[in-house]
Amino acid sequence: MEPVGPATRFRLAPNVRMECFADGTAILFLPQAEETLSLNATAALLCSYADGNHSLGEALSQLQEVFPDANPLLADFVACGKELAARGFLHWL
Amino acid sequence: MSEGYDGEWVVLSSRFRLGRGTGRELSRQIGLLLAGFEPTLAGSPGGDASLRVTVEGHPGEPGWAVFTRGDGHIERRPLQRVGAAAVEHAIISRAVEGERHNVVLHAAAVQHSGGAALLLGDSGAGKTTLSLLLRHAGLHLLSDDISPMDPATAEVLPFPRSIHLDGAYPAEVRESLPPLPRGLPPERVPFPPPTAARASEKDSRRTAAPAPVAVRHIVVLGRATPGESRTEPLQSAEAVQHLLRSVIRGEKRDLATVLPALFRLAGTARAHRLLTSGPLEARDAALALLRTPGEGAPPSPSLS
């Protein structure tokens, strides 16, 4: 597989459920493993683009549009995505 | 609340009845410890499982609590030392593990004018102490250790099991509790009766099921060094993780059936972490938190 970068598309793993809250945070739930993961608002936003149609770079652009004062780095997104993938919640395409 | 041995109690979805052959004194003591649970409640969920409890063994020695269902099925639970406290523990454990309707949380709960506050924390975090101190301050005690929650509404129910005082407690705690009945071990106190106002309210609905209470606050207890005490807001996702750690998983209850209720709860209650260096400080911080205007409102959107 190619290295993960701005053009890499991604999606939540099959069966992963995402519950979003009014404060922007979210919970990911993997039923078969009975595992949960709590996401802060930035990670939740990243996962909201995990539909297989968006790339990491596009997700980052969207985040900067929604939160112009925020300054997230692509490297942070990549690291977050890799952790989610390592824990079975996300797949790279 | 019954004064003594009634011989039959509804605990969650199970109905327990002491079998003949349990000694008179042991029966009386078990009855005192379970007196908070109403023996007959119209509309209560009791009766899903009706169990006869018999005790095998001699007082103070290892023995068994034997649960016999109506269909003859028998379950045996070991008792480290035959006595009222061990039998009560076996009954409560059986009720919690066999619960099929409510989600059961390892949490204390108190009721204030705005609703209920769930107090979460590991064993030894101070749930019992804080809940009794809040009762002493005028709040209504729902439970000091175990809180059932209706998964459909995310409301909590009272759980009036006996109080386990197995450590050092502020003077206010001991003073606020009724005198210990004869024969009970000093670390087991029957669930304290409601305040006078609550008592008359309770009498008026004696034949009704315990009223569920909407949860407005989730308070996670933690320790801080002196001078470093603080109250921190928790985001909803963090609150869910704390709630998840507090769920007592019963038979055949998987996470997927529990999560929707926790999501609902975390989405509607305000959650905070209370870091304090002592019980009285925790009480003052909790009272300040519970009396903050705007309770029940979700936190403002933020980015972290």
Image: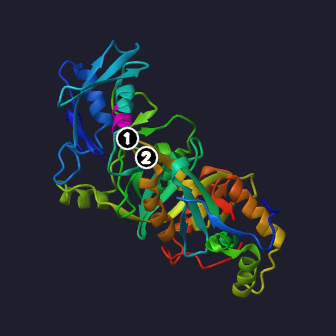
Image quadrant where one finds the C terminus of chain B? bottom right
The span picked out in magenta is B91-95
Are the two marked residues, 1 and 2, in contact with CB atoms closer than 8 angstroms?
A: yes
Residue denoted by label 2: B146
Estimate the spatial distance between the alpha carbons at disc 1 and disc 2, rounded to whole Å: 9 Å
Q: Are there few (<14), some (14-19), or many (20+) residues within 10 Å of tag 1?
A: many
Residue denoted by label 1: B96
The quadrant where residue B179 appears: top left
The three-letter amino acid code for the residue at tag 2 is Ile
Residue A6 falls within the magenta-colored stretch: no
Q: Position of residue B262 (x, y in %)?
A: 47, 60
Q: Are there few (<14), some (14-19), or many (20+) residues within 10 Å of tag 2?
A: many
| Front in this rendered view, residue B129 or B39 | B39
The three-letter amino acid code for the residue at tag 1 is Val
| Front in this rendered view, residue B250 or B186 | B250
Number of marks drawn? 2
**Image height of A45 relative to B155, above or below:** below
Please indicate whether residue B21 sits to the left or right of residue B161 in the image: left
Please indicate whether residue B3 sits to the left or right of residue A30 in the image: left
Q: Position of residue B273 (x, y in %)?
A: 62, 60
Q: Position of residue B138 (x, y in %)?
A: 43, 60
Which comes before the other along the chain, label 1 or label 2?
Answer: 1
